[in-house]
Amino acid sequence: MCHQSVEKILKAYYYASTKDTPPYIHSLSRLAERSGLLIGLSEDFLNLIDELEPLNIESRYPSYKEMLMRSLNENKCKELSNNTLSLILCCGK
């Protein structure tokens, strides 16, 4: 859900900046780049985008999804959630 939340805020930022329909893509780094945010983001937020990018996997890759889910524990999920909220708040300013 963190990936989807960041994707939606980046698309909202894109629309607010360009008054154009955001591209139909799911790549957070490409959305940040196209919206003009990529250059202004801190290293921490760029790292978060890199970390969230692979979390948006399609259901047709169940083995990859299982491997990814095993790498996430409660503390990691809390960290991702808190960092996602910080990024969303930063983009909303």
Image (cartoon, rainbow, N blue to C red):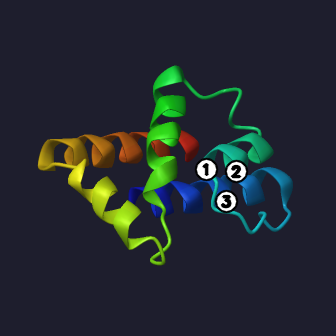
The residue under the point 44% across, 40% down is 51
Residue type pointed to by label 2: Leu
Q: Quadrant of the N terminus?
A: bottom left
| Residue at (45, 37) in percent of width and height | 48
Toward the viewer: 6 or 17? 6
Report the residue marked by disc 1: 28
Classify residue 11 as left or right of residue 51: right
Name the residue carrying label 3: 11
Q: How busy is the neighbourhood of tag 1: few (under 14 within 10 Å), some, or many (20 plus)?
A: many
How far apart are the alpha carbons under marks 3 and 2? 7 Å
Left or right: residue 77 versus residue 64 is: left
Kindly report the distance in space between the C-alpha atoms of the residues bearing marks 2 and 1. Answer: 5 Å
**Badge 2 vs badge 1, beta-carbon distance below 8 Å:** yes
Q: Nearer the viewer, residue 64 or 40?
A: 64
Quadrant location of the C terminus? top right
- Per the image, label 1 sits on a secondary structure element best described as helix
Q: How crowded is the residue under tag 3: few (<14 C-alpha within 10 Å), some, or many (20+)?
A: many
**Residue 31 shows which numbered tag?**
2
Mark 3–mark 1 distance (CA, rounded to whole Å): 9 Å
| Residue type beneath disc 3 | Lys
**In the rendering, which numbered label is found on residue 49?**
none
Residue type, label 1: Leu
Q: Are marks 3 and 1 in contact (CB under 8 Å)?
A: no
**Which residue sits at x=81%, y=68%?**
21
Q: Of all residues shown, which one is farthest toward the front?
A: 63
Q: Along the polypeptide, which appears first: circle 3 or circle 2?
A: 3
Q: Position of residue 82 (x, y in %)?
A: 29, 43
Image marks 3 and 2: residues in contact by CB distance under 8 Å? yes
- Of circles 3 and 2, the one toward us is 2
Percent across and percent down for residue 86 are 40, 40
